Amino acid sequence: MINLINHWFDISECDRQLQELQVFLATNPSIPETGENGLQKFFADRPNLILLLGYWHFGLEPAFYKPEVSLFNNEFRADFVVSDREKKKFVFIEFEDATEDSIFKLKSRRSEMANTSYDWSSRYEHGLSQVIDWYYRMDDYERTNKFEEYFGHRHVSYSGLLVIGRDKFIQHSGLMQRFRWRSHKTIIDSKPLHCMTFDQLLEESIEKLSTLKLSDQLE
């Protein structure tokens, strides 16, 4: 069965860690995915930030998480997984780097008169394909005994979240609109595939936490 880490979600601690994320992004214009100053280590050291990402799946109250989970112990690995207490709802999270060429790469121009244009980067296509492969493997195993052995249930609901790049690198030549359009329109097997930059992740996380604070105060 999938082995996850139980962690109580602390709103105050998450608020502090979101402030740390804001400083981290402000002081590091370009950020690698791995390494001592990489994105994976930053988030792995802050489990409340990881748990907050569980709210990207409707109705998920985060209770468990784990870094580097291989689905069904095979070749498809998620950087982080978040689940509810019953382990019936999941968010699978993929982080890619936050560099100038993370999402788009400038096409080679054949002449000085040619228009400037951009291709989707190999890094973005890799991250997107990773999430699609999770969906494929989940659907492939869902009608098997192995699925129930792994999750403890015959059926679970799940969402994929891809976080990549920085706003400032795509805020020109219509690239932000192009990125947002593809992100909003990508549906895999009737399931949404959430995709955003780390700046957008910070902005939406602050909004989600504000809603949670208000809800906590009303109880």
Image (cartoon, rainbow, N blue to C red):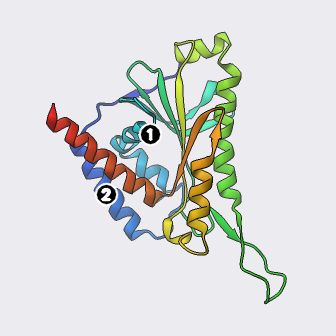
Q: Is residue 211 above or below residue 120?
A: above
Amino acid residing under circle 2: Glu
In the picture, the disc for residue 45 is: none
Secondary structure type for disc 1: helix
Q: Are marks 2 and 1 in contact (CB under 8 Å)?
A: no
Residue 34 visible in the shown view: yes
- Residue occupied by mark 2: 20
The percent position of residue 71, horizontal first and vertical second, equals: 61, 29
Q: Residue at x 61, y 48 (%)?
A: 185
Give the distance between the C-alpha atoms of the residues marked 2 and 1, in whole angstroms.
21 Å
Look at the image and tell me in which quarter the C terminus lies: top left
The percent position of residue 101, horizontal first and vertical second, equals: 63, 67
Amino acid residing under circle 1: Trp
Q: Residue at x 83, y 86 (%)?
A: 111
Residue 74 visible in the shown view: no
Secondary structure type for disc 2: helix
Q: Is residue 81 above or below residue 175?
A: above
- Answer left or right for 84 relative to 138: left
- Answer left or right for 143 relative to 60: right
> Which residue is nearer to you in this view: 17 or 178?
178
Q: Earlier in the sequence, mark 2 or mark 1?
A: 2
Which mark's residue is nearer the viewer, 2 or 1? Answer: 1
Density class for disc 2 (Cα within 10 Å; few <14, some 14-19, many ≥20) is some
Density class for disc 1 (Cα within 10 Å; few <14, some 14-19, many ≥20) is some
Which quadrant of the structure image shows residue 99? bottom right
Residue lying farthest to the top in this orientation: 145
- Residue occupied by mark 1: 56
Q: Residue at x 33, y 31 (%)?
A: 7
> Which residue is nearer to you in this view: 55 or 28?
55
The percent position of residue 196, horizontal first and vertical second, equals: 52, 54
Q: Is residue 63 above or below residue 175?
A: above
Q: Residue at x 66, y 42 (%)?
A: 130
